[in-house]
Image (spheres, coloured by chain):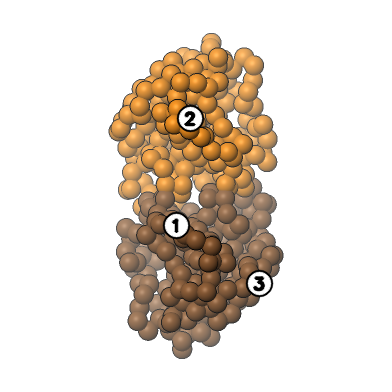
Chain colours: A orange, B brown
Amino acid sequence: MASLQRSVNVGGEITSFVGGDRGNWQIEAMTTIIGGALDTSTHLDMISDGTQPVGTDHVWVLQGVPSYHRYVNRREHDLLTAGKPALGRPEATCAALIPIKKSESWWALPQDERRAILEEQSQHIQIGLRYVPAVARRLYHCHDLGGPFDFLTWFEYAPQHRGLFNELTQRLRDSQEWHYVEREVDIRLVRR
Amino acid sequence: MASLQRSVNVGGEITSFVGGDRGNWQIEAMTTIIGGALDTSTHLDMISDGTQPVGTDHVWVLQGVPSYHRYVNRREHDLLTAGKPALGRPEATCAALIPIKKSESWWALPQDERRAILEEQSQHIQIGLRYVPAVARRLYHCHDLGGPFDFLTWFEYAPQHRGLFNELTQRLRDSQEWHYVEREVDIRLVRR
């Protein structure tokens, strides 16, 4: 599930995160960090087979696609690939879904300046690597899909690593890069 | 129409290029450069208002979104912005739509290696700048949308610049970057 093949060149393999009153994951908390809230729901279902959620019994649907790396260099790419923990580990019964939207001023920057803010100033990639293998992570892109967010990041970890995960999210939120985040919701979940 | 605002942060503003028997552009030639052909059609319509083409009287629909820059640095960004010719110039009665798809091996490369191939080895950005202002260009991204191509590039130029435009496309096709192109169709058009 976490092989390199799945993480590249899979444009169009849409994953839907469906908030509602059923699903494999129970929502423990939804915290609006900045910008507009998402409506409250009790459960989350993840649909990765490309089908669309049907009916009207969901509260919201967020969609994204795994895609190619936008910022990592060869060294970081190899470190990320070597250390990448799988999703679906039996002990990783906690998860988080964190949708974010960045500002127009972020997207108007050229590539080299976005990279410099993300890594040289904010150590985004380095920080993520420090919490491997405790925290497994998968990034879904949605900027080009036109929804309300630019990225949906999914994290999985064991209950004893809740504190570590809180530390990870706090470090990122304290970074220069986060000045460009204009909407962020932090959804914490446990496997049913 | 060619302002900076339109070229950034417009995820979801889908443009549809519709091949069929009607539209504002008449198709003069469709050449399959590599990979599968597109079915023959006589006209092309461009729908940029976000609506979807309806009915079954079209032969194909290719969709993409203007998006943020993936490779340009600040210097290139400023050169591109300063010299960017507008679309829709009255004298630019010739156009080309060139959809391309790149290989899995391209998308599996880290960002720094893709950038090095695209610009340091292939001078993609520099070559494009040499044909400004004769050739106006707009790039639509579709990798994350899951269609048959990764990019749709739209070009407009005056009839006396046909030769220049052929030179531009040939230079790019001769570059290292083009080794990663596995599907390309070259559609030439004239305004009706």
User: Which chain does the numbered disc 1 sit on?
Assistant: B
Q: Which secondary structure, mark 2? A: strand
Q: Which secondary structure, mark 3? A: strand
Residue B24 seen in the figure: yes
User: Which chain does the numbered disc 3 sit on?
Assistant: B
Q: Nearer the viewer, residue A85 or B114?
A: A85
- The label shown at residue B32 is 3
Q: Nearer the viewer, residue A162 or B176?
A: A162
Rendering coords of residue B35 (x, y %)? 69, 65
- The label shown at residue B4 is none
The residue located at (33%, 43%) in the rendering is A103
- The label shown at residue B52 is 1
From what the image shows, is residue B2 above or below residue B110? below
Nearer the observer: mark 1 or 2; the answer is 1
List the residue tagged with mark 2: A18
For residue A156, what is the image quadrant?
Answer: top right
Rendering coords of residue B192 (x, y %)? 43, 82
Farthest residue in the bottom direction?
Answer: B160
Gap in Å between the C-alphas at discs 1 and 3?
26 Å
* Type of amino acid under label 3: Thr
From what the image shows, is residue A19 above or below residue B95? above
Q: Nearer the viewer, residue B48 or B106?
A: B48
User: Which chain does the numbered disc 2 sit on?
Assistant: A
* Type of amino acid under label 2: Val
The answer to whether marks 1 and 3 sit on the same chain is yes
Left or right placement of residue A170 versus residue A153 in this view? left
From what the image shows, is residue B110 above or below residue B28? above
* Type of amino acid under label 1: Gln
Rendering coords of residue B149 (x, y %)? 59, 58
